[in-house]
Image: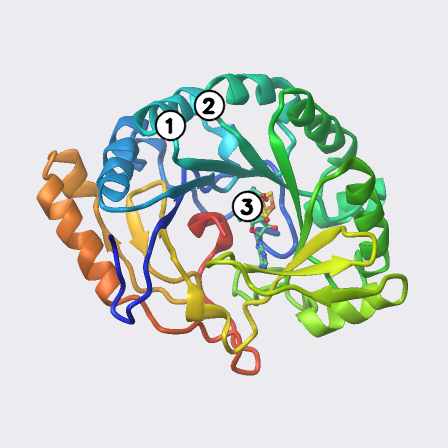
Amino acid sequence: MLKDGHGRVVDYLRVSVTERCNFRCQYCMPEKPFSWVPKEELLSYEDLFKFIKVCIDRGVKKVRITGGEPLLREGLDNFIEMISKYKDDIDLALTTNGYLLPKSAQKLADAGLKRINVSLDSLIPDVAHKIAQKDVLPTVLKGIEAAHSAGLKIKINCVPMQGINDNELCDLVEFCKSKGYPIRFIEFMENDHAKDGAKGYNSIQIQNILKAKYSFKKLERSGSSPSQDYIMEDGYVFGIIEPHKDDFCATCNRIRLTASGVLIPCLYFEDSQSIKEAIQNNDIDKAAAILNDVLLNKPEKNKWSENPEVSARAFYETGG
Ligand code: SAM
Ligand code: SF4
């Protein structure tokens, strides 16, 4: 079992397979970065898999593939198959913007993927266009349908932004209810890479918007899920991810690996260590020692609750 320096069990690894993206979301990557990490500097799928095995062998139970946009990296279905075949009870999931799902959903399901989170911030084509800076909505909706037809369990992620999609939160709930998908609203996490002036909402504000139409109750937190769930009168459950809350980090069970082999203990802070050399040299003991060291130094708490602070970390690099 892996534990961090504060006694928290770490059993969830998020793996970013690319920092590149085909969207330019205002809250994440409003402009193309000055340069991408050259493809030859990324860890190969075989090397990422070697490190995933190090983690699974030491107690990791959940692996989420993310990015940038993970479906942009070729061969993702083979990578998913490697992981799902290694341990068939691993909780393997993917987070995507959905744009490439129409042609890849079935292949992902065939490779052993069970669960998928799709980002859907608006149901109005022009608003979705404004957020992603591209005409994305029709294709994303087709992608969600394709994932559903392929038998994938779907969750929807939405980042409410002031003056952009805040008048649609109830419509998004209605859409998800009608389809049977849980929705999770994510508090905007202030970071240096987001569009200047971008403003989100905290959990209380999101709840107040939803209260105009719905009555709901807070549920007991289950395990170390990052989401605080709420139940509506008709039994529909939605979640809010509340990193600005003081106690959000108390149950953090996550560690993040970037596409170039950098192991990041906290989404907020810049501290990290690379496992690239150890993994490429097949030095599994060294990779495991780096993992332990990173865990030992995992910060107790992010700083978003402090008024709010702005992180220097890019979401498209860490994978959210
Ligand atoms: N491209 C994929 C997507 O958009 O789902 C996966 C990568 S994205 C970085 C992972 C998640 O992070 C998405 O749900 C996205 O909405 C969320 N995210 C990105 N920037 C954020 C920010 N500044 N605050 C809160 N959530 C953010
Ligand atoms: Fe791309 Fe996802 Fe970031 Fe949007 S949130 S820019 S889709 S990585």
Q: Earlier in the sequence, mark 1 or mark 2?
A: 1
In the image: residue 108, left or right of residue 268: right
Q: Is residue 180 left or right of residue 97?
A: right
**Residue type highlighted by circle 1:** Asp
**Residue under numbered circle 3:** 32
Residue to which mark 1 is pinned: 88
Of tags 1 and 2, which is closer to the observer?
Answer: 1
Q: CA distance from mark 3 to mark 1?
A: 37 Å
| Front residue (pair 253, 95) | 253
The residue beneath circle 2 is 112
Could you tell me which residue is drawn at 53 percent across and 17 percent down?
Answer: 107
Residue 184 on image: x %, y %: 66, 53
Compared with 175, 109 (above or below) is above
Judging depth in this view, the residue of 170 and 90 nearest the camera is 90
Dots 1, 2 in contact, CB < 8 A: yes
- The quadrant where residue 144 appears: top right
- Beta carbon at label 1 within 8 Å of ligand 1: no
Instruction: Tell me residue 167's x, y (percent).
Output: 86, 59
Under mark 3, the amino acid is: Lys
Q: CA distance from mark 1 to mark 2?
A: 9 Å
Of tags 2 and 3, the one toward the viewer is: 2
Dividing the image into four equal quarters, which quarter contains ligand 2? top right
Q: Secondary structure at mark 1?
A: loop
Label 3: how many Cα within 10 Å (few below 14, some 14–19, many 20+): few
